[in-house]
Every structure is written in structure tokens, then in C-alpha cells.
Image: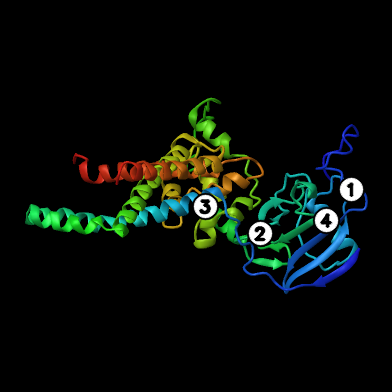
Amino acid sequence: MNAPVPNAAPRDPTVEPAAGAMLTVRIRRDDGFQTFTLARRPAQTILDVVTAIQREQDPTLAYRFACRVGMCGSCAMMVNGRPRWTCRTRVAAVAEGDALTLEPLRNLPVVKDLAVDMEPFFTKWTAAHGAFEPGETPLGDFAVVAPDSPERRAVDAGIECINCGVCYAACDVVSWNPDYLGPAALNRAWTLINDVRDQGREARLDAVSGDAGCQSCHTHMSCTEHCPKALAPTFAIAGLKRETARTALRRFGARHFRRSA
Amino acid sequence: MSAGTQSAPLPRRGAARPRAGFAAALLHRLSGIALALFLPMHFIALGTALQGADRLESFLGLTHNGFVRAAEWGLVSALALHMVLGLRVLAIEWFATRERTALIVSACVAAGLAVGLLFLLGGA
């Protein structure tokens, strides 16, 4: 289920539980919290826990996963109040006195038990113009992008996002303003703003500069703190703030100070 | 192993735990509101000078009571706190500072309170 545990360190307290140790798991379900008890195991992950509960105690428990190795981004849920990938989170690292509380991701509608509806997340991703825009007439030749150019570096910093929704669940602004586009969508927009091949820059800047856009970010850094890929959507949003402000000034100047031909 | 047992529901799903970034934003907002509320009183005080020195002096006489002194200390602390937390936001957004959020926020709060303390020690 997880990376192999080397035999050389069998007593690592973050991997190996005491013999016979039990785990108490509170899971939020449709009608409140339900408590389960199961045995601790070496290198046990949160995903192992919900899988064991579903297989051995309650087959009606709903949760979502696919790859089990931190690639697909589908297994995220709230673990003791923090959004995490369950496949890459070991019980020993987060259990509080042999107890866990599992809840569905914050800021998203619940489908059943621990499975949430990701549609609002991806709707906002689209609303932020998250798709590459090649333009009506494709470029005549390949774009030459120097690996160490500032634009390419900015893209590199955010391109590894796999849309797991952890940042969206961690964001306080989303919980206050359900229309707020959220860190993942804005991070995606920032990577495309810095893509020299993209032809949708102006429309994308308009899309991310409304009331629900980048200027609403309060810089709590929750998204950056919780991102399992160690990305920094806060800095992408800061880049969008600078770029939208610069574009607004340029448009203002063009409207009021441009000489008529 | 035991079968699942029902227990009472907890309030509000996924209630956020207090975090340093949230605390910084809250303090920044509250100190900003305090400063905004102070500004009209500041302008009223300045405005009395237009009606002569005596009028200004009599108005300033009102500020010698203990409550206003305590409020002045709070105001100076709020001003310092607002400034350092603003510098923190600029450091994050312009220079991509991401490490040690809790330490930096704690240092900001300490700096704000230290300025307030200096104000008190300065014989306010």
C-alpha cells in the first residue's frame, strides 16, 4: 500500500505500532459520526484504515481512491481537521492518542460519507480559463522557451498540480465566499498566463480579476501549507494580483492618454 | 474489532483549526479597523486648532484621563502591528517568503507589542 518499510528500522515509532495497539476511528457519515475500532498495523495509511473498515466492518462506507500512490489525487479527505491525501498519510504520523477523525473534504458538497462532489472545483477551474487557448491561427513554428526564462520558471513552480482539492478544502476564503475561484484554479491560470504559446491571456486576466478572483485572497497561506505536492498557490495568486493590476493600469493609460492617430 | 456504533454529531463540518496565517490576517484586519475608527477623531482634534489654540488645548485636556491614555497605547500598538503584518504580506507576495509562518507572525505580534511598550516607557 505504501513505500516498503526497510527492515533496518523496524521500531520506528512513526511506522511500527506497539503490539496489540488498537485504533479508534470516528467517521462523519450522513447521520453524524460513527465510531469504528480496528487494529494498528505497521506503516498503516489512512487509506488502509478506511479500506479495512469497508471490507471487514461496514461495506456501505463510501470513499474514493484510485492509484494508492499519490498520483491521481482522488483520495483526499479531512484527517483530524486537516485536508490530506489518505494514501500518503501514515496513521502513526497523524493519530492523536490512537484516535482519528475522518471527514469529507471541506468546501465541497458530499455525495456520500467521505466521497465529495468535485464538480464545483472543476467548474471554477474552467471559469478561470484553465484550458490552454491555442488561438484561431496556430503559431507557424514551435515556440522557443528557454528553460531558465522567468516565464518558464513560473510555470514550473505550479505545473505539477494534480487537482486533488486539498488546497480548495484548506482555503478559508472559499468557505466564506462560495464563488471564490480557489487556489487550484488560480494556480492553473497563472501557469497559462506564463505560457508564451497561449493566446487567451486578456480573457483569462479578466476571468481571474473579478470579486471572486485573485484579489480576494487573504494570504492565509493555507493552500501553500497543505499542498501535498509542496506547490505554492499563494505565490501564483500573488503573481496574478500583480499582473491584473499592471494590465488594469495599462488599459487605463491606453484609454485616457493614448494619442489619437 | 467492533461493529460501528452511533455517536452524537459534532458541530459544523470541517471546522478550521486556528493557524498562524489566519491569526495574522485577523489581527491585520482588526488593527486596520481600529485605525480607521481613530482617524475621524484625529481629524476632529486637528480641526479644533482652526478655532484657536485655546480650543485645541481644551480639547487635548480631555485626553489626559486614564481611559484615553490606555486607548492611545492600544492605538500605537495597533499601528505598529498593522505595519509589520503589512510588511509580512508584502514579503510573501513580492519575495515569495514561505518558511516559518508561525515564527514570523509571532515576531510581528511581538514587534507590535514592543512598540506599544516603548510608547508606555516613553512617558506617554
Classify mark 2: helix, strand or loop. Answer: loop
Q: Seen in the image, is B122 located left or right of residue A152?
A: left
The answer to whether A215 is drawn above or below residue B101 in the figure is below
Q: Residue at x 54, y 46 (%)?
A: A221
Report the front residue among A33 and A139: A33
Report the front residue among A122 and B35: B35
Dot 2 and dot 3 within a common chain: no
**Chain of the residue where label 1 is placed in the rendered structure:** A
Q: What's under tag 1, amino acid-wise?
A: Ala
Answer few, some or many: residues within 10 Å of disc 2's Cα (few below 14, many 20 plus, some between 14 and 19): many
Foreground tag (2 vs 3): 3
The answer to whether B100 is drawn above or below residue B77 in the figure is above
Classify mark 4: helix, strand or loop. Answer: helix
What is the spatial separation of the Cα atoms under label 2 and label 1, in whole angstroms?
A: 30 Å
| Residue B84 x/y as whole percent | 41, 42
Disc sitting over residue A49 in the figure: 4
Q: Residue at x 50, y 62 (%)?
A: A176
Answer few, some or many: residues within 10 Å of disc 1's Cα (few below 14, many 20 plus, some between 14 and 19): few
Q: What's under tag 4, amino acid-wise?
A: Val
Answer few, some or many: residues within 10 Å of disc 3's Cα (few below 14, many 20 plus, some between 14 and 19): some
**Chain of the residue where label 4 is placed in the rendered structure:** A
Q: Quadrant of residue B90?
A: top left
In primary-sequence order, the first of circles 2 and 1 is 1
What residue sits right under mark 2 in the picture? A105
Disc sitting over residue B22 in the figure: 3
Report the front residue among A140 and B83: B83
Answer few, some or many: residues within 10 Å of disc 4's Cα (few below 14, many 20 plus, some between 14 and 19): many
What is the spatial separation of the Cα atoms under label 1 and label 3, in whole angstroms?
A: 37 Å
